[in-house]
Image: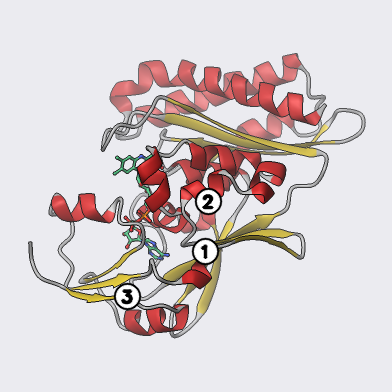
Amino acid sequence: MKQFCYYAPTTVEEAIKLLAGANNNTQIIAGGTDFIVQINHKMISPEKVVDIKKIEELKYVKEENGFIKIGAGTNFSELDCSEILLKKAKALAAACGEVGSTQIRNLGTIGGNIVNASAAGDSIAALMALDASVVLKSEKEERVMRLEEFYQGHGNSQIRKDELLTEIFFQTPNENTATSFKKLGKRKALAIVVISAGALIEKDDSNKCTKAQIALGAISRYPIRVKEAEELLIGKELNEHNIEICLERLSEITNISVTNSPFKHLALYKGSAMKGIAREMFADILADLK
Ligand SMILES: Cc1cc2nc3c(=O)[nH]c(=O)nc-3n(C[C@H](O)[C@H](O)[C@H](O)COP(=O)(O)OP(=O)(O)OC[C@H]3O[C@@H](n4cnc5c(N)ncnc54)[C@H](O)[C@@H]3O)c2cc1C
């Protein structure tokens, strides 16, 4: 393995100073669960490594001014049992509980999951359903970007090499809202064979859907929001018939998307699999909305 210079800052300020002017030879490491695999497989060969594990100010879940805010260095085990998430954004707690094994959840961070930008990133689909945004800090500026914008296009995410992802935030879902996340299959080591769905549904007193945010994972380069399916529910009564129409559309979107993705060999089964897990997701949501 090529030698590299290793830095372990203890504050965000120190970290972004170390990242100033960074290029492809500089690499951040958080939990290291993707980083170590990438270095072992010679996918990366950094000259400078900035380890952010010791930055305590990046580890938190809090509710502030109507928003839930999460430090990028928070690991999945902490998020999986966060009282705030379990009470107000169950989809994200569930997604974090689905990641890898206990060891991976103890090390892996939500920030690493977002920046690694896997099509099957569990927290990403849930965060998209919650319409989350990310805060990216560099010495020069601070950028705030909705996740959908962060994952535009088919290449890499929008983060620059001199930027540190510091926070993820989304509006606290109100009392007439329920969220859920479902995933099919366990991911073993590097095999990406999952399909996932996350949703946030809000209803009014007459059981009409007033807000629908649905995201699907592992059907294209990044998890995606599916506005066409959301529109089929908004303004409609939340009953079996209308949900079935939405499920049908989710299945069609999955088939079309998978056919044009790296998972095209799985196109045959992913459409019906999506319908199955999305049905379970809606059952969860309807039970919570009662
Ligand atoms: C056996 C195994 C099973 C897994 N199972 C799953 C699974 O089921 N679901 C799933 O979603 N993932 C899974 N993963 C992938 C991995 O655990 C996650 O992507 C994890 O969240 C990565 O976080 P990390 O802190 O370990 O990131 P690292 O490996 O430290 O970093 C990952 C990338 O993000 C960058 N980075 C990290 N933090 C920041 C930051 N704050 N700002 C800017 N850049 C940053 C790093 O430079 C690197 O490019 C698995 C991995 C393994 C090895």
Counting residues from the start of the chain, the first of labels 3 and 2 encountered is 3
Q: Position of residue 289 (x, y in %)?
A: 79, 30
Quadrant of the rendering where the C terminus is positioned: top right
Could you tell me how far apart the alpha carbons at marks 1 and 3 are, in whole angstroms? 16 Å
Q: Quadrant of residue 215?
A: top right
Q: Nearer the viewer, residue 8 or 121?
A: 8
Residue labelled with disc 1: 59
Q: Are marks 2 and 1 in contact (CB under 8 Å)?
A: yes
Q: Position of residue 144 (x, y in %)?
A: 56, 68
Q: Residue at x 43, y 31 (%)?
A: 257
Secondary structure under the numbered disc 2 in the rendered image = helix
Counting residues from the start of the chain, the first of labels 2 and 1 encountered is 1
> In this rendering, would 130 be left or right of 56?
right
Q: Nearer the viewer, residue 102 or 70?
A: 102
Q: Is residue 152 visible?
A: no
Residue labelled with disc 3: 8
> In this rendering, would 202 be left or right of 263?
right
Check disc 2 and give the amino acid type.
Glu
Counting residues from the start of the chain, the first of labels 1 and 3 encountered is 3
Could you tell me how far apart the alpha carbons at marks 3 and 2 are, in whole angstroms? 22 Å
Q: Residues within 10 Å of mark 3 (few under 14, many from 20)?
A: some
Residue labelled with disc 2: 78
Residue most extreme to the right = 205
In the figure, 145 relative to 85: above or below? below
Check disc 3 and give the amino acid type.
Ala
Quadrant of the rendering where the N terminus is positioned: bottom left
Q: Residue at x 52, y 77 (%)?
A: 142
